[in-house]
Image (cartoon, helix red, strand yellow):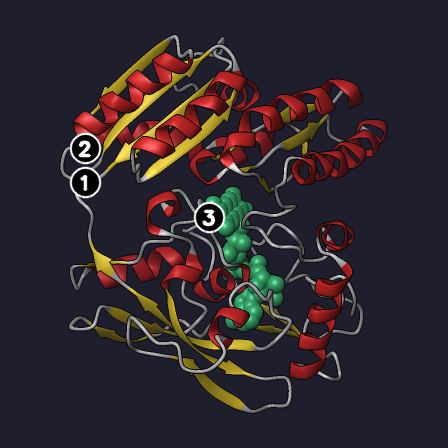
Amino acid sequence: MVPRGAGSGLSGGSNAIDGSLVVCVEKMRDVLLVDEGNGYVETQPGIYNTELREHVAQHGLWYAPDPASKDFCSIGGNVNTNAGGLCCVKYGVTRDAVLGLEVVLADGRITRMGRKTIKGVAGYDLTGLMVGSEGTLGIVTMARLRLGPIPPTPATVVAVFSDIGDAGRAVSSIMNELRPSMLELMDNASITAVEEWRSMGLDTSAGALLIGQFDSPGAASDARRLGELCEAAGASETFVSEDPEEAEMLVAARRMVIPALESAGDWLLDDVAVPRTRLADTMVQIQEVAARHEVRIATFGHAGDGNLHPTIVTPRGDADAAARALVAFDEILDVALANEGTITGEHGVGSLKREALAKELDDVQIDLHTRIKDALDPHGILNPGKAIPRW
Ligand SMILES: Cc1cc2nc3c(=O)[nH]c(=O)nc-3n(C[C@H](O)[C@H](O)[C@H](O)COP(=O)(O)OP(=O)(O)OC[C@H]3O[C@@H](n4cnc5c(N)ncnc54)[C@H](O)[C@@H]3O)c2cc1C
C-alpha cells in the first residue's frame, strides 16, 4: 500500500511499486476547523500547501512552512517528508508546526495523536515519529497545524560574490548575528540557467548570490547589516530593497532554478545538509565532483539551514553523461557525510537513498528503525522498500 499526496516528492517515496495499491488522498481537501483563539488549523491531508495558507489568511493567520513547491504539494506529503522551505530558517520546518495527527495504522485502527496545547510531554512523541516517516508507519488523514500572525512585508537583500566559498563563509557570520526570515543561495550555474531560461537581469559573471530577507521591526537595518557582513566576507556588491515587487522578483529568480534546470537537459536533483561552518568546503568539493566527472552541477538551496540542492544536468539522451551523473550523485552524498552532514535535508530517503542512509546510520540505529517498523506495521504493508534501510 503506497500512500500518496500530490506526487511532487523528489525521492520516489510515493511511486507505485509492483503489486502495490496506491492510496491517494488528493480528494481529501477540506479544512475542518480554524481555531483562531488557540492558533491552529485542522485540515484533511490532500489540500495543497498554498491553498491552506490562503484559507487561514482569511482568518488573519499564517502557516509558516513554505516549500518551493507549495503551489503543487499537499499537507499530507509535507507532514510525511517533514518538508522545509524558504522561511524555515526562522520559522522552523513542518515538524515544528505539527501539533497533532489523525492516522490510519497498518492494522486498520484509527487514532488521533498529539495535542491541542502548545506544550505537552505526556507519553512518547508518537506525532513526532510519524512526521517524516514517508508513509511507512501510517496514513495521515488529518493534520492539526500551528498558526501564527501574518508577518509584515520583508526587507530583501542580495549579495553578489565572485567566490562561492566566500558566500558559504558569510552564512556563518550572518546566522551568528542576525535572524533572517530567508537566506537562500544560488551558484553561478544556477544563475546562468535562470538567465538562459527567462532573462531576469541577473549577473551571470557572479560566482554566487545570497538572497536574504528580514520581516521583524528593524528589517531594513538588519538587511543593511547582512550586506556589511557579506562585504566583509568578500562580496563585491550588495543591494537592499524594501519594495515588495522588487523583492518578489528576486525571490522568484530563486524559485525558478528548478524549472530552469529542468528545461536545460536531463536532471538529477540532490538534497544534502551540512553544519553551516562546513558549507564553504562542501560547495567547493561539489564543484570538484563536477569537474572530476565532467558534468554540470548547479548548486542552490536554503543556505541558512545548510541545506543544498546540487543538481546534475546532462544533455538529453546522453547515456554516457547520465552514467557519470549517477556516480557524481553518490559522491555528493559522500561529500555531505564527510562534512558531518546528512544525505537528505528535506526531500526524504524514499526509494532513491536507502543505500546512502545505511552509510549515515550506525548498526544500532538501523536495528531500531527495523524494530519500530515491525511494531507499527508487522506485515510490512505500508510503503515497503522505502525510507528505511531494511524492509
Ligand atoms: C520544483 C520543486 C520544488 C520543491 N521544493 C521543495 C522545498 O523547498 N522543500 C521541500 O521540503 N520539498 C520540496 N520539494 C519536494 C516535495 O514537493 C515535497 O517533498 C512535498 O512535501 C511532497 O508533497 P506531496 O504531496 O507531493 O507528497 P508525495 O510526493 O505524494 O509523497 C511524499 C511522501 O509522503 C508520503 N505521503 C504523502 N501523503 C501521505 C499521507 N496522507 N499519509 C501518509 N503518507 C503520505 C508518500 O508515501 C511519500 O513517501 C520540491 C519539489 C519540486 C518538484
Amino acid type assigned to the residue bearing label 2 in the image: Ala
Instruction: Tell me which label, 3 or 1, sits earlier in the chain.
Output: 3
| Residue drawn 61% across the image and 28% down it | 282
Q: Are discs 3 and 1 less than 8 Å apart at CB? A: no
**Frontmost residue, 364 versus 217:** 364
Residue 343 appears in the figure: yes
Query: Measured from the top left, where is residue 164 in percent x and y?
Result: 53, 18
Instruction: For marks 3 and 2, give the one nearer the viewer.
Output: 2
Q: Is residue 251 visible?
A: no
Quickly name the residue at label 2: 219
Q: In which quarter of the image is ligand 1?
A: bottom right
Image spot of residue 369 (x, y percent): 69, 69
- Between circles 3 and 1, the one closer to the viewer is 1
Task: Say which residue appears at 48% left-offset and 54% top-offset.
Answer: 83
Is 158 on the left or on the right of 291, as rendered?
left
Q: How far apart are marks 3 and 1 (CA)?
A: 25 Å
Name the amino acid type tagged 1.
Ser
**Mark 2 packing: few (<14 Cα in 10 Å), some, or many (20+)?**
many
Residues tagged 1 and 2 counted as in contact (Cβ below 8 A): yes
For label 3, the residue is: 69
Circle 3 — which element? loop
Task: Using the image as rendered, state which of residue 28 and residue 1 is in the foreground.
Answer: 1
Crowd around label 1: few <14 · some 14–19 · many ≥20 (10 Å): some
Dot 2 falls on a residue whose secondary structure is helix
Question: 10 Å neighbourhood of mark 3: few (<14), some, or many (≥20)?
Answer: some
Res. 364 image quadrant: bottom right
Which labelled disc corresponds to residue 216? 1
| In this view, 149 is above or below 105 | above
Secondary element at tag 1: loop
